[in-house]
Amino acid sequence: MYTSMFRKAMLGDTALLSLDFTTGTVPTAVTFTRADSTARATFIDASGYVKTVASAGDARFDYTGGVAKGLLIEAAATNLFSQSGDWTVAPWSKPAQITWDGSTTATAPDGVSAAKQITVTSGSSASVAQSVASGTNRSLSIWVKAGSLTSFSIGIFEASDAWGTGGTNTASIISGPGSVSQVVGSLWNVTGLSSTVWTRVQLFRSTTSTTLLAYPGSSGSGITGTAYVWGAQMESGTQASSLIPTTTASLTRLADDAVIRSTAWTSLYAQPGAMVVEFYRGAYGAGDRSVLATDTTAARHWDLLHANGSATSQIAFSSGSAVTQTGLVSGLNKVAIAWNAPSPTASFDLCVNGATPTFGGSNVGTTLSTWLTLGSQSTTGVSGSGTWDNYLNNSIKSVKYYTGLTYAEMQAKTT
């Protein structure tokens, strides 16, 4: 059974399970669920466009630079802004120094919509604004493209703190050309914009009450010119997630849950065992990010994770100290783990991107797990049931299972 997934691979690969998520389909061994009521989840397709899934619960297969990244796994998120694609209507507000030219548009990052041109006619005080409810840890993201202006500024402000100087403020480019520099507080300039390629920029502020999207143009006085804007998103968390398009109201995208369970997993799992996983490091959200995890029951549990925003990978498990190793990169990573490994024995070993494996010194225990979650942890292993958390917030490219790997094999398969 499961002959399409469980196979002895050629060219010396002895994997009993081989899952390739770059083909654009969910392997039959994997149960995938996202309980959205309508199609609202987006991803980047092979042509670089922001696309919305065809049906509400469809899995998403992300791309970067036209290269398939694999299965996208994200936690639930809410775009607190309404009218994310059209800043010309309420609840967006603007002063007299800003005008919109509805007849002058650019094709939006989704390849379909028309992104309107914004014109600043005088001064740095010009701003487009939308307020959201008070809260902590807000992230703002937008797409922008140059017209006559090659710079653009964004900010998250509070009514009591006009320059947004309270709390932590950081900004970065998610995709496209350009660079960011801090002007003051949570006001940041984006420079080096292209007139042909869209740039997505994100801004994080650790505390905020009234939120404004501000300064289209430059922070300097007397600046005038045009730019194109699209895809405004304000959400909780330290960095932006995939766009959740909105119209008249804010909207929530539910979490992606993926699990291998029942005989699809129990027919494989044994002592000794090993796995090799290719994944993109999750770059946003608080706390550690799970890559692979078994049952949360103590005698059965292990969790391959990475520390959020750092280069550290870790195996946490039911007994003994966690096994850690640095060496994760911001892009694609290859990591191998082995339990009750043949060399040395009775250990939990970790190998990150071809480095010398770290010897864990303890084993997971003799009680075998009954499920494996991909890109998160679960208390039940059943989508829609129990608690799912510690989402990867990025893509898993491939997963392989072996009856065991030596240190040399772990290094070879992750190089």
Image (cartoon, rainbow, N blue to C red):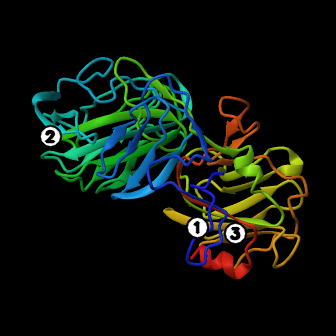
The local secondary structure at tag 3 comes to strand
The residue indicated by pointer 2 is 226
The local secondary structure at tag 2 comes to strand
Query: Is residue 365 shown left or right of residue 290?
Result: right
Tell me if residue 101 comes above or below residue 193 in the rendering: above
Q: Amino acid at mark 2?
A: Thr
Which of labels 2 and 1 is toward the front? 1
Pick out the residue farthest to the bottom. 408
Mark sitting earlier along the chain (2/1): 2
Residue 325 has which mark? Answer: 3
Labelled pair 2, 1 in contact (Cβ < 8 Å): no
Mark sitting earlier along the chain (2/3): 2
| Residue 138 drawn at (x, y percent) | 51, 35
The residue indicated by pointer 1 is 334
Identify the residue at image location x=24%, y=32%. 126
Label 2 crowd bin: few (<14), some (14–19), many (20+), radius 10 Å: many
Label 1 crowd bin: few (<14), some (14–19), many (20+), radius 10 Å: many
Q: Quadrant of residue 153?
A: top left
Query: Is there any visible trace of residue 185 in the rendered image?
Result: no
